[in-house]
Amino acid sequence: MDLITAEIIREYLLTVSEEMSETVTRTAMSPVFNEGHDYSTAIFYFDGRQISLIARATVVPEHIYASLVSLEVMLKTFEADIHEGDIGLVNDPYFGGSHLPDWTIMKPVFFEGKPTFFPVVRAHQLDVGGPVAACKNAYAKTIWQEGFRIYPIKLVEQGKTREDVWRVLLANTRLASDVDNDLRAMIGACKIAEDRIRSLVSKYGIGEVSESVGYILNYSEKRFREEISTWPDGEYEGQAFLDSDWGGGHKDININCKVNVKADNISIDLAGSHPQVEGCVNSPAGNTASWLYTPLTAICPDIPVNSGFLRPVKLILPRGTVVNPDPPYPTGQSTVCVGNQICEALMAALEKCIPEKVATAGLDLTFLYNWGIDGRHGNYFLGLDYIASACSAGGTYGQDGWGGYTATHCALRIPTYEMTEIQFPYLYHRGEYVTDSAAPGKWRGVPAWELVREMTNAKDATVNIFVQSYKYPLRGYVGGKPGTGNWFVVNPSKPDEIFVDSFLDRSPSPPGQVVLARSGGGGGWGDPLERYPQMVLDDVLDEYVSIEGAEKDYGVLINRETMKVDEEETRKLREKRKRG
Amino acid sequence: MSMRLENVVSEMAFVLKERMGARYNRWVKDTAVFVVTSDGTIAAINNELHFGSASEMVLSLLAPEGIPIEQGDVIVSNDPYLGSSHVQDFYILSPVHHQAKPILFLGAKAHLPDVGGDVQGGFNLRAEEIWAEGVRFTPLLVCREGRTDTCALNMILLNSRTPDLLRLGLESMIAAVGAGKKNIQSLIEVSGAQGLLGEAEEVVTDTENGLRETVSNWPNGEYLGDCLVHNGNIKAKGLRVETKLKIKGDEIEIDFSMNTSQLREPYNSPRGNTLSFALIPFFPLLHSGIAINGGIWKVITVKTNKGTLVDPVLPAPTSFSPFHVGREISTSVKSSIEKFLPGEEKERLDRRVTSLISWHPTG
């Protein structure tokens, strides 16, 4: 094996992962897939003993590391009963999943009689039965109250579809037609990957490809070990809090994180985190691992992401806690909460070790769901409004918070208003950044996002709202300020106005109902008094910051007439503030 | 009447009861075992209370568009839209093959304790959709070619708060069917497959003839019946189940087509449940020589409209249907029958029907 060939093979497999992803986007039916891009694709390698992630598309990382566990569980369950042409499926959080809507499909690709490669698609199915549409049961105390649990099972056996299994899946969703099509899109992506992998192996031979995989994994491991060894040895602690578990009755749910850096190894211990709770925020081990691996890969953007990268990392996830719950505790919202807080706790710990590399890397939570009958055609609709749960990127060293998702959900796309209005009985009044809401910092967070939407021609419609980070907004780093937090108002300024800072469960949503969603943005990085005055002026000109806000939050004085920074007065004001 | 088929189902019932054991004692009346011919006709059943539901489920399981059932297979379903009353009622069906062809099917039905949903046990007063009551298992093969499909079985068990009890129930049903198969094979050895099938055909014909004779003694006409639904939990007020009973010669039509639209409450009666409860008032009127089997459907037809309280469609919840509106269906039909019965028989019928419709253990 030569290194150039190995690198070509690595890039080839990445390209195949991307082609899988494109296949899903272009063939899936539901907007969650083809608009929101809430799925992930990857290729795994099995050496007979161990499964390794070797390539992934630009995906939702929170999906893909958890897929590793799902795949391990499927292989363990099927044991020797894996054959050419099989397609396996699992969604259960206690069998390698995260929450019930995330379904993982795998297809073994055989060489020399052995299952060697596994193309995998993990995707968010919008509905999986259960008492509340979209698996959004704020009062779920057990997983059975969230939806249909899928034990590892084969959807296709040696090329023949298990029609009975397929029908059971469709019987347990409110969106049978979408799921039917989206499953085919997922399988199609795996089949295309198989074709491409076979082409690769026919060109280079399985021996050279396998050797290259070994090199690819070792290379990432080596690179990450080199990176860790530049970090100061020591023990670093961080903590983050979740406002509540909604209907479970628990508040101020803590995540404790202790990071130990020693030479080129790192261990992450979440001991002391809150015991598992009755609300739907418990994060199964695979999901927790994903939320810990993601920040690590995000802070090393030039190291190829695969299982080799993960080798220097040891995770300690105490059982019976919100970061590694036991069945049957509910997990429905764990992919964001407490996932985000796990990520924040790790970043808080790393802030003391590698301050220039940390930032908001999680996802704020302002979930807005509606379902009912669309009066335009009389069909059932179920919509997850991604536009309401907009972007919460924070500032990081050298970069303001950007207008897109953070690392954990970086491949998600915000659908367009126009397309969403075609698909659902909604009318968007506005969606815009809010002046003076960006978390101040030397590099500020993205401003808060405010959306106003009206329900139009719907019948028997219901609205479900979930909010976190009202009490504990996304934190700032290295002196940066926190975000402004999240909340909703239903029917603002009307007699029946409802302010929502936690959740609204299955409330009627008649035509004319207006919902205002406020997503508070990520934290700032660094002391706001060190922000370049010209950048503050740019923000004022962009209306992200008012002239008053420039003075209050940044100590920058701007002349209203000339719209220029008064540099001398700014210097004096900042010095005065720094002195105390 | 074929005592041999009756004996087969008796032994199946015995095995089912013994295997389910004490933990299922209170649910014994909510079980049934049956023998089905290859065209989907029930030739023998041990519990007439579930005959309607079992008939509907068998037709669904054996429908041309259904899942193929091969030798050694066992198929399971609890789907109310295929014949079950509610998701807690599981049916299994398995073929008996002779010379590589399915000649009979053996089935079992049992109310099993929990299959997910919002409320343990599935009786969810607040359910507006079936998924709030539990998981729907459309026909799923849990045994294939004589071997348990562990993944399929585990998928069912994973969706129960009481997987051990559910496993016990399902395995008991499979054991009962297994015992029935052995007996059927023995009977085939004794009298040959054709002999046994001839007997099955004969008992069905006997029932048809016996029922026709009974019905032909009843006065022709249309008889209206109805029953107000009595339950404080039902939000829909003034709910009634209406019946139009038509007797013409030796045939009966029970017409429920005038009934109200389905509810967003768990009282909808799926067609299988409606069939079961619609037939109950007739059983006390049949002489003891008339066995309960598919011959009944040659004489009695039941008319329902899709999307109504007595024949709901997805996603109507159904968990309480064996109580409400099942009981009201029986009472409504009974009240239509009473229109032509003499006084002393009315009283007897009333007592018998009241007793029969109160079979459900949680009633």
Image (spheres, coloured by chain):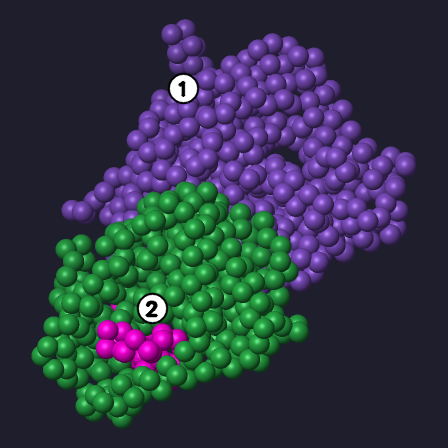
Chain colours: A purple, B green
Where is residue A431? Give x, y as percent: 39, 47
Residue type, mark 1 in image: Gly
Residue closest to the eye, A567 or A151: A151
State whether residue B130 appears in this view. Answer: no
Q: How many marks?
A: 2
Vertically, is B259 above or below A480?
A: below
Which residue in the structure is indicated by mark 1? A555
Q: Residue furthest left?
A: B343
> On the rendered structure, is B329 left or right of A171?
left
State whether residue B321 appears in this view. Answer: yes
Residue type, mark 2 in image: Glu
Q: Residues within 10 Å of mark 2 (few under 14, many from 20)?
A: some
Work out whether disc 2 and disc 1 sit on a shared chain: no
Q: Which residues are magenta?
A: B282-310
Q: Residues within 10 Å of mark 1 (few under 14, many from 20)?
A: many
Q: Chain of mark 2?
A: B
Q: Residue furthest top?
A: A579
Q: Residue furthest front?
A: B190
Report if residue B289 lies within the magenta region.
Answer: yes
Which residue in the structure is indicated by mark 2? B48
Residue at x 41%, y 43% (from the top left corner): B162
Where is residue A382? Give x, y as percent: 40, 56
Where is residue B88? Give x, y as percent: 37, 55
Closer mark to the observer between disc 2 and disc 1: 2
> On the rendered structure, is A233 left or right of A203?
left
Residue at x 27%, y 53% (from the top left corner): B361
Residue closest to the eye, B130 or B18: B18
Where is residue B320? Give x, y as percent: 27, 58
Vertically, is B260 above or below A446?
A: below
Q: Quadrant of the N terminus of chain A?
A: top right
